Amino acid sequence: MSDEPQQQNGDADPPGWAPRDLPADAAAPGPAPEGDRAEAADGTAPKKPGKAKRPKRTGWRRLIPTWRMVLGGVLLIALILIGGFIAGYQLVDIPAANASATAQSNVYLYADGTVIARDGDVNRENIKLAQVPRTVQHAVLAAEDRDFYSERAVDVKAMFRAGWNTLTGKGKQGGSTITQQYVKNYYLGQEQTVVRKIKEFFISIKLNREQSKDQILEGYLNTSYFGRNAYGIQAAAQAYYGKDIGDVTTAQGAYLASLLNAPSAYDVVAHPENKAAAVARWNYVLDGMVKEKWLGPAERAAMTFPVPGPVKPANSLSGQRGYIVKAVEDYLVGNDILDEKTLATRGYRITTTLQKKKQDALIEAVEDKVMSKTDDDRAPDRNVRVGGASIDPADGHVVAMYGGIDYTRQYVNNATRRDYQVGSTFKPFVFTSAVANDSTTQDGRRITPSTIYDGTNKRMVEGPDGPTGYDPANEDDRSYGPITVSTATDKSVNAVYAQMAEDVGPEKVRQTAIDLGIPKDTSDLTPTPSIALGVATASVLDMTEAYATLAAHGKHGAHVLVSKVTKDGENVTLPDRTVKQAVSREAADTTTSILQSVVEGGTGTAARGAGRPAAGKTGTAEEDRAAWFAGYTPDLATVIAVMGQDPDTGAQKSLYGALGLPRINGGGAPAETWAQYTGAALKATPAQDFDLDVEEDTGDTALPTAESTAPGDTGRRTPSATPRRTPRTTPSRTPSAPRTTPGTTDNPAGGTGDGGADTGGGDGGDTGGGDGGDIGGFLEGPRGTRAPSTRP
């Protein structure tokens, strides 16, 4: 056995180890000698050996809490939580009903402070739970809280899950029970604050002890917001189906329950583009009822979606007021300034960017150039709808908006709806993309205003690998032969622009449109050559924003509709507007230069009536269902669209015969309306000329030979190395009265500018009368064989 001292566990220690806790002369551990056990000579008892001290924690071990520390911490937290719960339960009482039970008005103002509208007519009718059909009650539970009758007042697990999902970027999640939602609706408010959530927690627990589940459900159904200014399920039944809640079917009740999740967004009448989402939510509710055994599978399978009836808004929102209020609400919600339920509590003072004089001028122009020409005895005139929007390019402010003849008669806002094709007003985006991307033709010629294309009718679009299979027709099957880009823009030649879109690259064209201001989720904004013909369904306001970007030399910022929001004297934070150079100045300004030609001698000559230097483009949707004029001066961008819609079914209708004309084209009523409005809106300001920095035309403009464009041979060559761009300022001028070119007419039957053929048939004539041919004119828009991917 080694003479070296042993560790306490009996293991030998390394040589040279000396114990630090024992004196140097201490004996080695082991049994005490007999003598040591005996009493000392003086009779005292021997001392027992002392307990060894615990070694001190050193190094990283000091950072790890001991089990005593952990246990103490847990107990301390538990005591704090228990104490906090007891204190909160004792201190938080059930308050009286909050102000939302008698909601205030929201006040909407023009930019100068003049009142536009008040929306304070609260539509609510309280009822007893027994009046609500059991199936409708079950639909609400399936939508909002399926365990309502068996759960406690507060679902802590759901609250933590919702908070975690929100913090981790999975979106705002609902974690509230119906009891909590009722407390929020009736006793508190919609504010997203920690204090409000704490109060909601304790009030819900107390309320659950004092009221029955039926009482809580009844209160919830009477205080919830369903859209269409309807508070409570009885008001909702009347607003959506024109009947008392007791007469609502199970399918209709499931739709009303669906609205609780997103009241206005799921209104398929106001937002037809959201119907798919609304139907999906409706199916979710019914499937939940089946899962909970509240509805039989066979009965569920037999149900069809119950489309709600038309909206009957309060008279206080008549005329343009209702359209403005709805557009402002959508703007506030869409930009995360206020959510819909918070806005519905009322009491907000909202200052818009709309300018009263310009708004009045737009209304007057629409009345003079469109609505006054309708006749109740003419069937097509029943289908006429008008949408208009105007934006200041300098700051993006929407200064005027026209939504329809009357909000109480035509509910859908024609300025913001996104279901009509924009037609040839999209073509400038193709050319802008060509300049911005330094694009060339298939045989390598740089695309400029003077580049020559083949305008032959139904010319097959050629791609890098040969024919694409897409051969769009020109209106009236007219062939133009060799034609410059500028002239093709004046006449809106489909064959040229479809080929140009392929030359640039359809995906690049799509991205340029998005950069200019067209929403990326716009329907039919498909990257195929047909994109050039305007099959996309952007709104009037979307198109105005994009054209305002061109007017601002390629700088884009989202449009602004609200400049200030206050409640109880406190300002609501508004987002900062970000402006960026979406496309190069040369690309935007070169586009402006060819659009000036459209106004001076193309399809848009009626716009010269504004008496201002102007640039613009006409457009017509497929089957003449909409006619557009999009244009701008250096200080104002405006888009006008005349649309056809059946007032009974809501189906889109052709405009043939409307206003007493064979057809309505972009250069007719839309351009005339634009001219009258623009002239009046800018009357008090001096005329400004366009200050343009355009791309220099190349001298290489000859039409390529047949060999260079043969299928399978792109014929690409390096473009000439001539200087690309030359700054240019457009000479100052004030347009004269609209001129008449040989072969065109300016009579009302033929249409001014946008229908200047001899017979007045469409958008065009040989020498600048419009987008068309000698007989019948040229109507821009998607025609001929459509690419397979253009439509579903």
Image (cartoon, helix red, strand yellow):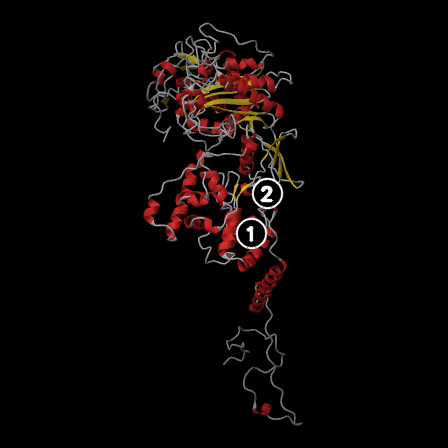
The kind of residue on which mark 1 rests is Val
The answer to which quarter of the image holds residue 444 is top left
Q: CA distance from mark 1 to mark 2?
A: 16 Å
Expressed as whole percent of the image width and height from the top left, the position of residue 30 reads 54, 84
Q: Of 169 and 407, which appears nearest the observer?
A: 407
Dividing the image into 4 quarters, which one contains the C terminus?
Answer: top left
Expressed as whole percent of the image width and height from the top left, the position of residue 545 reads 53, 27
Total numbered circles: 2
542 shown above or below 32: above
- Residue 103 is tagged as 2
Q: Is residue 456 visible?
A: no
For the residues carrying marks 1 and 2, which lies nearer the camera in this image?
Answer: 2
* Mark 1 residue element: helix
Q: Which residue is mark 1?
A: 183
The answer to which quarter of the image holds residue 766 is top left
Q: Are marks 1 and 2 in contact (CB under 8 Å)?
A: no
243 shown above or below 764: below
